[in-house]
Amino acid sequence: METFLQTTINGLASGSIYALGAIGLSLVYAILKLVNFAHGDFMTLGGYVAFVVNVSLGAPLVVAAAAAVAAIAVVGLITEAVIWRPMRNRGAGVMQLLLLSIGLAFVIRNLILFGWGGQEKRLDIDNTRTFDLGIVRISLIQVIVISIAAVVLVAVGVMLRSTYVGKSMRALSDSFDLAEVSGIDTRRVVTYTWVLGGGLAGLAGVLAGIFTTLRPDTGFLLLLGIFAAVILGGIGNPFGALVGGIALGLVQEWSTNWITPTYKEAIGFVVLILVLLFRPNGVLGHATRTG
């Protein structure tokens, strides 16, 4: 039981990072039908912005996290204005946008490598402090990651369910054209989508930097798991992405009770395949109507 509880805490921490990244990725796909392979590098850039503010400038970690969220939200808006909107207006298809996002990912990753080098970076936080809860120990880092992620994920869920902006985002995800005809300001909602998606990516990058270390490929290494979380929960469903991210983190960590931790990522994808065999549209996905 002690080992199970310990791996559960570990899984909640890693799953929280997956969930934050997956919600932003899922929102962008749901509304714009854009498979953004640069999303992982947005996360990395957010981590490095936090590193500059927290370590280079000596600001508190909370200020660094806020700066990262704001910076990556702005990056999302810039890419929308400079790349994605002009390409949509020119009738670019899914494949063209996909290739553009891959190219953007390489550009961001190499700019990070050029600016900060390839050495690992650490945020200024005590990574040795732990709390003994009797049958389980939880580190300060895990407390921070799980607590921040829980608050943000609940806030995002409430926003999507209860606010006008959230309902507008859900309307656009159902039918962009119908939402536009019904009077929704689609351009403004797209702006909000990039602000939210970019902000969540920036925060996920900061938490990833807290949880492990920062490298130019940190987000890239997390991206496959984030895509798995999106698919597991249901493509284009932000709530499914949340469930998928937490579930993936838990399954991977629980598997270390029986197998070598080296293979935990593979176990996560085995579970993904098994789920999709019975639920091809994901846990919270809906079947696509044809004919």
Image (cartoon, rainbow, N blue to C red):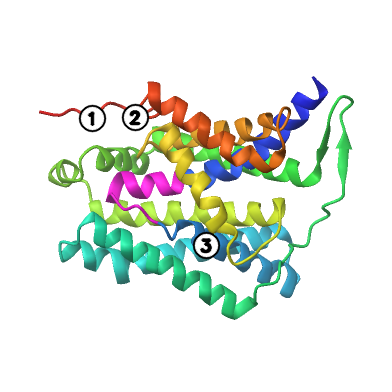
Residue 101 image point, x, y percent: 36, 62
| Cα–Cα span, label 1 and label 2 | 8 Å
Is residue 25 in the magenta section?
yes
User: Looking at the picture, which amino acid does disc 3 mark?
Assistant: Ala
Chain part drawn in magenta: 23-36
Query: Is 8 left or right of 171, judged from the image as shown?
Result: right
The residue at which mark 2 appears reads as 281
Q: Which mark is residue 288?
A: 1
Q: Nearer the viewer, residue 67 or 198?
A: 198
Residue at 29% across, 47% down:
31
Q: Callout 3: helix, strand or loop?
A: helix
- The x and y percentages for residue 154 are 54, 35
Residue in the image at 82% along x and 52% along y? 127
What secondary structure is the stretch in magenta mostly built from?
A: helix
Looking at the image, residue 102 lies above or below residue 165: below
> In the drawing, what numbered circle is on residue 70?
3
Q: Are marks 3 and 2 in contact (CB under 8 Å)?
A: no
Would residue 172 be found to the left or right of residue 64 on screen? left
Which is nearer the eye, 161 or 101?
101
Residue 37 placed where, x, y %?
41, 57
Q: Position of residue 15 (x, y in %)?
A: 60, 38
Quarter of the image with the C terminus in it = top left
